[in-house]
Image (cartoon, rainbow, N blue to C red):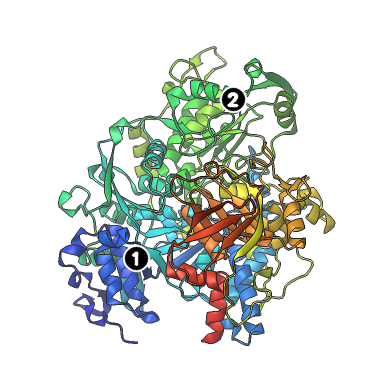
Amino acid sequence: MTNPYAGIVEPLDPERPDHKFYNLSMLKDDRYGRLPFSVRVLLEAALRNCDEFLVKKSDVENILNWKETQKKSVEVPFRPARVILQDFTGVPAVVDFAAMRDAVKKLGGDPEKINPVCPADLVIDHSIQVDFNRKSDSLQKNQDLEFERNRERFEFLKWGSQAFKKMRIIPPGSGIVHQVNLEYLARVVFEQDGLYYPDSLVGTDSHTTMIDGLGVLGWGVGGIEAEAVMLGQPISMVLPEVIGYRMVGIPDKLITSTDIVLTVTKHLRQVGVVGKFVEFFGEGVAQLSIADRATIANMCPEYGATAAFFPVDNVSIKYLEQTGRDADKLEYIEKYLKKVGMFRDYRDKSQDPDFTEVVEMDLTTVVPCCSGPKRPQDKVAVTDMKKDFEACLGAKQGFKGFGVAPEKHSNCVNFAYNGTEFSLTHGSVVIAAITSCTNTSNPSVMLGAGLLAKKAVEAGLSVKPYIKTSLSPGSGVVTYYLKESGVMFYLAQLGFEVVGYGCMTCIGNSGPLPEPVVEAITKGDLVVTGVLSGNRNFEGRVHPNTRANYLASPPLVIAYAIAGTVCIDFEKEPLAVNASGKEIFLRDIWPTREEIQDVEREFVIPAMFKEVYEKIEKGNERWSNLKASSDKLYSWDPNSTYIKSPPFFDGLTRELLPPRSIMNAHVLLNLGDSVTTDHISPAGNIARNSSAARYLSKRGLSPRDFNSYGSRRGNDAVMARGTFANIRLFNKFVGKQGPQTLHLPSGEMMDVFDAAEKYQQDGVPLLVLAGKEYGSGSSRDWAAKGPFLLGIKAVLAESYERIHRSNLVGMGIIPLEYLPGETAETLGLTGRERFNIIIPELLVPRMKVTIQLDTEKTFQACMRFDTDVELTYFRHGGILNYMIRKMIQQ
C-alpha cells in the first residue's frame, strides 16, 4: 500500500542525500508548533506505521488536533522504535515466544514468524541478591551464587538471543537496565536504512520512564503488550492528556535530586496524573542535570503518570558527549532534532507548547526529605522524621500506621551479635542500602554519599555491624568513579561494599538478616526499618522483617545507618558520639554542592563510559562458557522447575469463538485500595509454608534452593501458586494480613491458590473485588497471568493503574470499574454473593455492562476496554492468542 506521506521525506543534509527524515515542518501549520514535545514524538512514530499499516490522514489530523482528540478518547496507532526488557519480565517473554512457536507449528504455520521485528535489548539485572555484604569479596560471592541459582534461566536466555533475531542480551553483572539504557543503549535519534527518527521505546519494567529524562519517549508496558510490539503490532492508544509541569527557581545547595523527586511524587499524586503524560518545562529545568531529570522521570510510576518527558536540549547533548557517544552521531542528533522542532531551550518561553493543564513547582521550596513508611508518595521532611515515625507507630493500621499499643512503644530487645551486646527498638535501622536505578545513576548523589562517608570516617564514626549495609551500583561506571575519586575506601569502611550490579534490595532481593536480629525483631514484635535509595517501599517488598521502609538519598541512607534509627532529629541530636567523646552532627559532615561538583567534573569523564561499555556485551567468563542449543524450537525439560511451557495456548483454535457472559462467579478475594502488583504477584522470597514451597518440595528441592518468585517467572506452576501470596496482602474475607482467603462454599480458610484450585475443580468462574488504584506498582505481567491461571475472569475495582489494566486486557481478563460515585460499600456488596456479568454481542469501548447478583440485586459497571484494539484482543482471549492467529493467516 502506498504511504500517503512519502512526499514529506527529505534529505537531512544537502551533502548527504542518503540521510533522510520525515520533514514534519511540512505538517506544521500553527498546530504542530503548539503540540507538546512528547506528542510530536508520537506523531513521528505514527508516520512510521506506513511499512505495514497504512497511515490514515485522520490519524495525523487526530494527533495535530491533539487537545480535542484526547477529550474524545480517540485511539491512534504508533510504533515504538524499540523494546527493552529485564530478566524477571524478559524470561517469561522468551518463554511465551517459545510456546507461541510451538502453537503456530501445531496450527500449521511457520514457527519462525514468531520473531522480533524491532530491536529488543534484555538486561539481566534482577537475579542477584544480597546474600553477602560488608566484605571485599561480597561481589564475587554474590555473583557466584547468582550463577549457581540461575544457570538454567541464563542458558535459556542465551538460547533466546540465538533463536530470535534482533534480540540482544546484556549479561548479568553489567548493571541495572534503566541505567544501562541511559548510559549506553539509548540512541536519542534512530537511524535505520538512511532514515532518521526519534528514539522511542516501551519496556517490560515500569521504570522504563527513566529514559524520558534524556528526551527519549518511553514507558512501561506489560510483558504481554511488549511481546506484541516486538512482533510488529503497533500500540494503539487513546491520546493522553499532557500536564505541563513548570519548574522555577534554584534549589538550595543542600538539596539532592532525591529530595526533588520525592517532592514531585507527592505533588503529582495530589494533582492526579494517572494515565497522563507529564512534560517538564520552565527555567528551573535548565538547572537540572540529565541525571537529575532521569531521577525525576524514573519515579513516574510512583506518581502514576504514563510518561514524564524532558525534551532534548544542550544539556542532553553534553550528557551524550560525557557518556562517550560517537561525535558524528551527536552532530546528526542535534541537526535532526532542530530540523523537526524537537530541540528545546527551556529558557525560551516562546517554545512553550499548549498543555491540558499547567502546574508549577518552585525548586527553592524543596527541603531534604524521605518517603515512607509504606508508600513512595508519603513524603516526610527529614526534620519531621522522628515525630512522624512515632505518630505512625500508634496510628491505626494503614499506609501511615502500625497499630502498636501505647504500652508497647518503648519495647526494647537486647541481643548478642558477634560477641557484642546490642539492642533494638521500634525505628531501629536494620537495612541500609544504596541501591536502584533511581539514584545510583546520578553521580552527584553517589559522590555526595562518598564524600559524606569520607567525612564520617575521618570524624571517627561507624555503622553498627548488625545493620545490613550494601552498595549495588546501576553500572560499572559508578564503581569506576567512586574508586578513582578515592571515596570508595570510605564507603567500604562504613560497610557499604559493592555487593553486585543489579536491582537487589530495591526489588526485595535483600537477602537474609542475621538470625539474632530476626529473633530480636520477632521477640519484641518490633517495627524496625529499612532505609534505601530506591523507588518503592510497599509492604512486604524490601524484606519480610522490615515493616517500615523509607526512601532516601544515598547520603541520607548513610546518615541513618550511622544513627542506627529513624527516630532522630538531625537538627537537635548528634548522629553519634565518637571515641573522643565529641558529638558529631549531620551538618558537620554533609558535603556542599560545590565540593560534589568539583569531584564530579574531575572524575566522571567519557573515557570511563567507553572503557566499561566496550566490553559489556561479552560478559564474564561464566557467561561466555554457558552452552545453549541452536535449535529454533525450544526443547522443554519436563523436570525443570525454572522453565516450563505455559498452558496459555492449550486448546487454541484457528476459529474465533465469541466471548461469553460470566455466570455464577464467586469472589475469590475482597480487597481494598492501593493493592499493588507486589501484593498480586510478589517477586521476593518464597515462604517455606506457601503453596509454591510445597510444590517445589515435592519436586525434591530444599528451601535453600527455592530462590525467589521473580527468578521463577518462567515456570507457571510456581507463579500460579505465588499469585496473591504476599504476606502483607489484606483480604477483607480474612480480616488480617496474609496470603489466605475464604473458600465460600465450604467456609474453610485456606491459601489463595488452594481455594482457586477447588473452585476450578467445581467449574466455578472467579472474580476479584478491589478499591482504588488496583495494580499500582511494577509492570509485572504475572500479576495478570497468575490471576488468569487461577480462573479469575474479571476484576471489579474503583480504579486501575494504567499498566496493570493493560496487562489484564492482554490476558483476556475483564477490567470492570464501578460507575462514578459507586463502590462495593455503596452497593452493599459483601463479596459473598454470586455474580452474573452479562456480556452483549455488540461490544464498544468503555461500555456499561449489567451485573446480576444471586440476591436479585442488579447494577452496572464500566467495562474498561478503552479502544477497539483492546476489544479485538478480548475477543481473541488475549493479545498473544491474537498474534498467533494473525501469524498463521499470513
Total marks placed: 2
> Mark 1 and mark 2 in contact (Cβ < 8 Å)?
no
Viewer-side residue, 230 vs 416: 230
Which residue type carries mark 1?
Val
Viewer-nearest residue: 816 or 158: 816
- The tag on residue 384 is none
C-alpha distance separating marks 2 and 1:
50 Å
- Residue on which disc 2 sits: 427
- Residue bearing the label numbered 1: 74
Q: Amino acid at mark 2?
A: Gly
Indicate the position of residue 309 as horizontal and vertical percent values: 34, 53
* Residue at image coords 48%, 72%: 842
Front residue of 300/298: it is 300
Answer left or right for 512 relative to 565: right
Residue displayed at 38% across by 79% down: 53
Where is residue 753 drawn, in percent x and y? 73, 53
Left or right: 483, with 768 as reference point: left
Q: Quadrant of residue 103?
A: bottom right
Mark 1, secondary structure of its residue:
loop
Q: From the image, which quarter does the N terminus lie in?
A: bottom left
Determine the secondary structure under disc 2: loop
Q: Choose mark 2 or mark 1, whichever is in front.
A: 1
Is residue 318 visible to the viewer in this orientation of the structure? Answer: yes
